[in-house]
Image (cartoon, grey):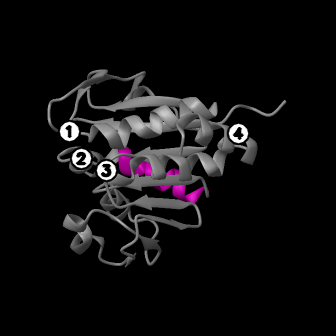
Amino acid sequence: MERAKRAYILIAEGFEVIEALAPIDVMYRAGVECVRVAVGDTLDVVSSHGLTTLRCDTLLDDTDFADGDVLILPGGNPGYINLRNSERVCDVVRQYFDAGRLVAAICGAPTVLAAAGVARHRRVTCHSSVVAEMGDYRYVGEPIVEDGNLITAAGAGHSVEFALAIAARLVATETLSRTRRGMEV
């Protein structure tokens, strides 16, 4: 029997609620284990607007990412800044990308790719406020952009579409169809 797919989602202080919860929800619905990883020293991480506190499963420094199929990076301000300022986050992004595993980033989080020095010259999208920070990338002003083992999304309004694009890479077509029907997408 095939091993269940596993997603790791990195949750930093100041994350955007919908950009984190939509992928967590869609992964759950599609049967993908989604491990919530706190980037910091506490399992409870506060969102960008202080709207919610998300209880994570593990701390970044206590996590072995070896068994993951995808690394998900939500945006939010200052969430994406906290992600890209973490050398450990950049190390994990490099490991996943260089191994050909899926890396998915939304909103400001594609700037983490630049900080990690991966995916140069690849097609990406991101929030309009960080386009100038994407230097050596081929910015495409589309809602969702897939380029090899990289999925990027423009922002919060595309969170469900982003999550479904990730799921499409991890689960069978029938599972994805059932997930979409259940969500009435």
Q: Is 126 left, or right, of 3 in this rendering?
A: left
Task: Tell me the SS state at disc 3.
Answer: helix
Front position among marks 3 and 2: 3
Circle on res. 41:
none
Contact? badges 1 and 3 (CB < 8 Å): no
Q: Which residues are magenta?
A: 89-99
Asked if the residues shown at circle 3 and circle 2 are in contact, with their CB atoms under 8 angstroms apart, the answer is no
Q: Which numbered mark, 1 or 4, is in the foreground of this view?
A: 4
- Which quarter of the image is occupied by the N terminus? top right
The answer to whether any part of residue 129 appears in the image is yes
**Disc 1 marks which residue?**
14
Asked which secondary structure carries label 4, the reply is helix
Tag 2 and tag 4, C-beta contact below 8 Å: no
**Label 2 or label 4, whichever comes before in sequence order:** 2
Mark 4 nearby-residue class (10 Å; few <14, some 14–19, many ≥20): some
User: Of the numbered discs in the image, which one, if any, rests on residue 76?
Assistant: 2
Q: Is residue 48 above or below residue 162?
A: above
Is residue 151 magenta-colored? no
| Residue situated in front as seen by the camera: 40 or 51 | 51
Which dot marks residue 156?
A: 3
The residue under label 4 is 175
